[in-house]
């Protein structure tokens, strides 16, 4: 542990570890500060990732993976199940091991890591320039200096606001998620199930992701607009009671997911924000693991290059915003527009759509064809979508 680093990364999640790793690989001195006792714990995630997405950045190790899934079922409010073949499939990770390993990979390239370290403020020099962070370690206030601070502190990010970047989420742009890992359930481990219904999860969906034949992550997200009068946990208890009455609950976790518009300001002088803290999760699905790794990689590369060029100004760091826009920005903007339209479908419209899709040959039930069918059979949705695309 030194008193000064090139880069201090706040948060040891996928975004932080990925940023730290890519900067450390370029020879920079990097410190990750994580408030929890262990990297990767608690797991506040349903742990699903697409195989193609993950393999783009990492070579998956068998110990990261609890289960491989090949199919998804989308279940309409009246119970009609639409089966989608993913063709390639995805994984249900073991994030305790996965996140721990991502941090280890950063450490192997030279990054230092401190856990039980709560960053509570930015450190500034006499001119007000950000030059490090202040943190509590075992209750003791401490400071560390750096040329760049990277905020990878998740959806509840406070650091960005302290740096003057607006990360406040509107109520409709945050999903309140709650999940139970349950045992003693009977599952087909090849399938991930998604339930859509205003009764089960208004403004969101319920997921059932099998970790094996009898263990699953079951959770739901509801839009912040629908938080009152019923809490997300009440919806989840009711769902588990009615669908899996013999389930034993092993863990319960809750957390927010940003399903928000594209954030086009992600840097200021000597400061960058990445991952959920930068609202980079997919607004349509809430999936953010692979996107956090991807954005972290870009963020770490730009930070390292900026230090090499002895220019860590906002102007220089904006290269990260540009590269991220080219990488994930356009898809993000489109996904947000679609979320706005799709979550406005009524239960009747969802049922009708499911019935129509089931008339397609099974091999044609890809996510794209499902979406097209949803559009074709919901004129109201078409006009909504045209409006959002034109606006
Ligand atoms: C219930 C739920 C289910 C989800 N399911 C999925 C899924 O199936 N698939 C998927 O792709 N995504 C899923 N997500 C989203 C996914 O978990 C996130 O997008 C992803 O973890 C983002 O990574 P990150 O590194 O940006 O943030 P995080 O993983 O949240 O990491 C942030 C880290 O910063 C630390 N931290 C915060 N503040 C401080 C501080 N002041 N000082 C020091 N450390 C700090 C935190 O302890 C944490 O370790 C889910 C989210 C939730 C809540």
Image (cartoon, grey):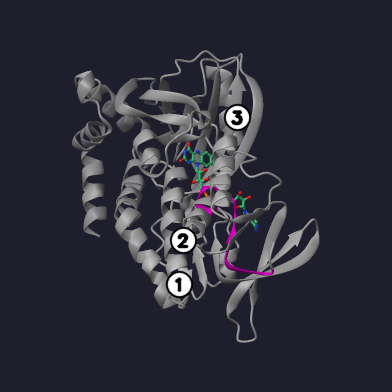
| Disc 2 to disc 3, C-alpha distance | 40 Å
Residue 11 highlighted magenta (yes or no): yes
Crowding around mark 3 (Cα neighbors within 10 Å: few <14, some 14 to 19, many 20+) is: many
Residue 124, image x, y percentages: 63, 78
For marks 2 and 1, the one nearer the N-term is 2
Outermost residue, bottom side: 127
- Horizontally, is 214 left or right of 384 in the view? right
Task: Report the mark closest to the observer, 1 or 3.
Answer: 1
User: What secondary structure is found at the residue carrying circle 2?
Assistant: loop
Q: Are marks 1 and 3 in contact (CB under 8 Å)?
A: no
| Residue beneath disc 2 | 26
User: Residues in magenta?
Assistant: 3-16
| Disc 2 to disc 1, C-alpha distance | 9 Å
User: What secondary structure is found at the residue carrying circle 1?
Assistant: helix
Between 357 and 294, the residue placed more toward the observer is: 294
Residue 72 in sight in this render:
no
Q: Are marks 2 and 3 in contact (CB under 8 Å)?
A: no
For marks 1 and 3, the one nearer the N-term is 3
Residue 148, image x, y percentages: 54, 70
| Residue beneath disc 3 | 180
Residue 11, image x, y percentages: 60, 54
Above or below, comparing residue 278 to residue 61 in the picture: below
User: What secondary structure is found at the residue carrying circle 3?
Assistant: strand
| Disc 1 to disc 3, C-alpha distance | 46 Å
Above or below, comparing residue 169 to residue 221 in the picture: below
Q: Are marks 2 and 1 in contact (CB under 8 Å)?
A: yes
| Residue beneath disc 1 | 308
């Amino acid at each position: 542990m030194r008193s000064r680093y090139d880069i201090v990364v706040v948060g040891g999640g996928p975004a932080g570890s990925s940023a730290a790793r890519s900067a450390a690989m370029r020879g920079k001195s990097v410190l990750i500060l994580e408030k929890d006792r262990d990297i990767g714990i608690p797991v506040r995630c349903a742990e699903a990732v697409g195989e193609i997405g993950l393999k783009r950045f990492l070579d998956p190790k068998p110990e990261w993976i609890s289960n491989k899934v090949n199919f998804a079922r989308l279940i309409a409010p009246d119970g009609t199940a639409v089966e989608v073949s993913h063709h390639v499939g995805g994984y249900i990770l073991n994030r305790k091991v996965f996140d721990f390993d991502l941090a280890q990979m950063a450490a192997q390239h030279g990054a230092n890591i401190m856990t039980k370290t709560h960053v509570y403020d930015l450190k500034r020099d006499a001119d007000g320039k950000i030059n490090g962070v202040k943190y509590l370690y075992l209750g003791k206030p401490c400071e560390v200096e750096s040329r760049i601070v990277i905020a990878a502190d998740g959806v509840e990010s406070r650091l960005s606001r302290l740096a003057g970047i607006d990360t406040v989420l509107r109520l409709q742009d945050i999903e309140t998620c709650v999940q139970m890992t349950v045992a003693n359930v009977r599952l087909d481990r090849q399938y991930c199930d998604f339930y859509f219904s205003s009764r089960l999860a208004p403004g969101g969906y319920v997921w059932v992701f099998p970790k094996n034949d009898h263990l699953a992550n079951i959770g739901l997200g509801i839009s912040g607009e629908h938080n009152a009068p019923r809490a997300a946990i009440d919806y989840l208890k009711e769902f588990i009671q009615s669908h899996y009455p013999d389930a034993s609950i092993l863990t319960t976790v809750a957390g927010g997911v940003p399903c928000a518009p594209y954030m086009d300001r992600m840097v200021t002088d000597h400061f960058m924000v990445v991952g959920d803290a930068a609202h980079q999760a997919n607004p349509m699905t809430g999936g953010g693991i692979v996107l956090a790794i991807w954005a972290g990689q870009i963020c770490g590369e730009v930070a390292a290059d900026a230090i090499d060029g002895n220019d860590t100004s906002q102007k220089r760091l904006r290269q990260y915003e540009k590269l991220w826009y080219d990488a994930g920005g356009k898809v993000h903007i489109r996904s947000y527009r679609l979320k706005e339209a799709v979550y406005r479908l009524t239960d009747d419209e969802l049922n009708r759509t499911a019935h129509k899709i089931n008339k397609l040959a099974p091999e044609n039930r890809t996510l794209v064809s499902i979406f097209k069918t949803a559009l074709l059979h919901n004129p109201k949705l078409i006009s909504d979508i045209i409006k959002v695309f034109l606006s």
